[in-house]
């Protein structure tokens, strides 16, 4: 249960925050002195960034003394929890649509890192599979059904492709990873866009379902001839092979920190809500994405204290700090571009409690 502070402590914490939170990088020093009473924060949502969050939330707790509990229940579940007012923040790989934002109080999107959705597969005799967007779309639409289909063979002339049936694997839960993947498919295949579209949940016509990125990765690792979309970290962690993709420039690209970062080289809107799939940037991996933490702009809801609101901002400022961003590569993600950090700091500065800007 979250701790309740006295009014006196809340005002004292607010005054102290004026100086202690002025520089998030200084606060990120492990020797920093905590200037307010520690609190417990809770969040839920995307499994895609979970390995990064596990590391960074623990590090934040060591620095600030706050405890952060995060449940990887999928982006859709996280957004529902925020709507219900039962969490301090939610994680989502899909930014909220204009329609979704009309259904809830004003929110702030804070990108936390960048990553890739990969096409992980289980073909013991094929280690360097290459796929194109149109081929991937037709595999998941059930139009390409065997591994030795001529269109796959053309892309992999030296590979020993079996005649076995392809077993597509997709997410069973409402998922930002599904949103990113189907956003990509909708850009590279007009037929996919018109028939199935883009969303956190899509009616895949063929294949088997699994829950969460860990679930999909687990199914693929155990199922010969399977293929599925999964956050790159899960493929790396389980040693699952994943395909190189042909991007919009005709380059064959694998996900790396450099190729993921290249996808974000374009303009980023002020609210940071943007898709970077199928980027036309040179060297860009085509299924790259930001992942976001989303909070309410007005932090006084569900009996939350001012100190909880301050702790939430401390957490997000820590996540986008130089120190935290340098840790992204250690868990196979890519750091945010400078523009995304700049915009996030400006957006966090607009967050209020009882209508008053929270001192940082």
Image (cartoon, grey):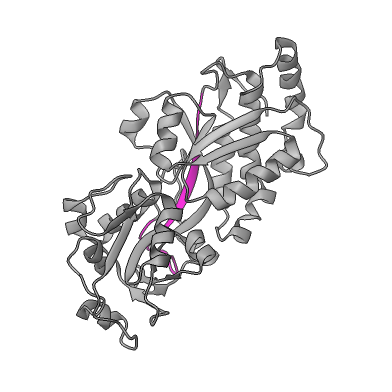
Q: Residue at x 35, y 76 (%)?
A: 130
* Residue at the outermost bottom position: 158
Q: Residue at x 56, y 61 (%)?
A: 332
Where the C terminus falls, by quadrant? top right
Picture quadrant where residue 151 is located: bottom left
Q: Is residue 29 above or below residue 296?
A: below
Q: Is residue 173 above or below residue 3?
A: below
Q: Residue 116: image x %, image y %?
A: 45, 59
Q: Residue 228: image x %, image y %?
A: 35, 62
Q: Is residue 309 magenta?
A: no
Q: Residue 45: image x %, image y %?
A: 46, 40
Report the side of 339 relative to 81 (left or right): right
- Can see residue 95? no
Report the side of 265 relative to 211 (left or right): right
Q: Residue 335: image x %, image y %?
A: 58, 55
Magenta-tinted stretch? 277-297
Where the N terminus falls, by quadrant? top right
Front position in the image: 190 or 156: 156
Q: Is residue 295 magenta?
A: yes
Picture quadrant where residue 66 is located: top right
Q: Is residue 187 above or below residue 291?
A: below
Report the side of 80 relative to 156 (left or right): right
Q: Residue at x 39, y 64 (%)?
A: 220
Front position in the image: 106 or 60: 60
- Can see residue 126? yes
Report the side of 50 relative to 241 (left or right): right
Front position in the image: 270 or 88: 88
* Residue at the outermost front position: 222
Q: Is residue 239 above or below residue 172?
A: below
């Amino acid at each position: 249960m979250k701790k309740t502070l006295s009014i006196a402590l809340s005002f004292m914490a607010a005054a102290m925050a004026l100086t202690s939170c002025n520089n998030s990088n200084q606060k990120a020093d492990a020797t920093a002195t905590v200037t307010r009473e520690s609190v417990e924060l809770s969040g839920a949502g995307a499994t895609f960034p979970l390995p990064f969050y596990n590391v960074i939330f623990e590090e934040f707790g060591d620095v600030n003394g706050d405890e952060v509990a995060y449940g990887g229940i999928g982006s859709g579940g996280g957004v529902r929890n925020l709507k219900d007012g039962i969490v301090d923040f939610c994680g989502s790989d899909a930014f909220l649509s204009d329609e979704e934002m009309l259904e809830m109080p004003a929110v702030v999107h804070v990108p936390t890192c960048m990553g890739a959705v990969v096409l992980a597969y289980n073909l013991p005799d094929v280690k360097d599979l290459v796929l194109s967007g149109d081929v991937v779309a037709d595999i998941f639409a059930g139009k390409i059904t065997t591994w030795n289909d001529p269109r796959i063979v053309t892309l992999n002339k030296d590979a020993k492709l079996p005649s076995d049936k392809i077993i597509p694997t997709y997410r069973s839960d409402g998922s930002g990873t599904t949103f990113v993947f189907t956003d990509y498919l909708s850009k590279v295949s007009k037929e996919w866009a018109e028939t199935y579209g883009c969303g956190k949940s899509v009616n895949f016509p063929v294949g088997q379902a699994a829950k969460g990125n860990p679930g999909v990765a687990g199914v693929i690792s155990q199922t010969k001839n399977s293929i599925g979309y999964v956050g790159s970290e899960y493929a790396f962690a389980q040693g699952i092979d994943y395909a190189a993709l042909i991007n919009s420039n005709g380059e064959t690209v694998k996900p790396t920190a450099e190729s993921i970062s290249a996808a974000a080289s374009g303009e980023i809107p002020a609210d940071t809500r943007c898709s970077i799939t199928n980027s036309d940037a040179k060297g860009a991996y085509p299924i790259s994405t930001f992942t976001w933490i989303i909070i309410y702009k007005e932090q006084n809801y569900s009996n939350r204290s001012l100190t909880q609101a301050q702790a939430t901002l401390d957490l997000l400022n820590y996540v986008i700090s130089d120190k935290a961003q340098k840790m992204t590569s250690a868990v196979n993600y890519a750091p945010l571009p400078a523009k995304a950090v700049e915009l996030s700091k400006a957006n966090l500065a607009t967050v209020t409690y009882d209508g008053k800007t929270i001192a940082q």
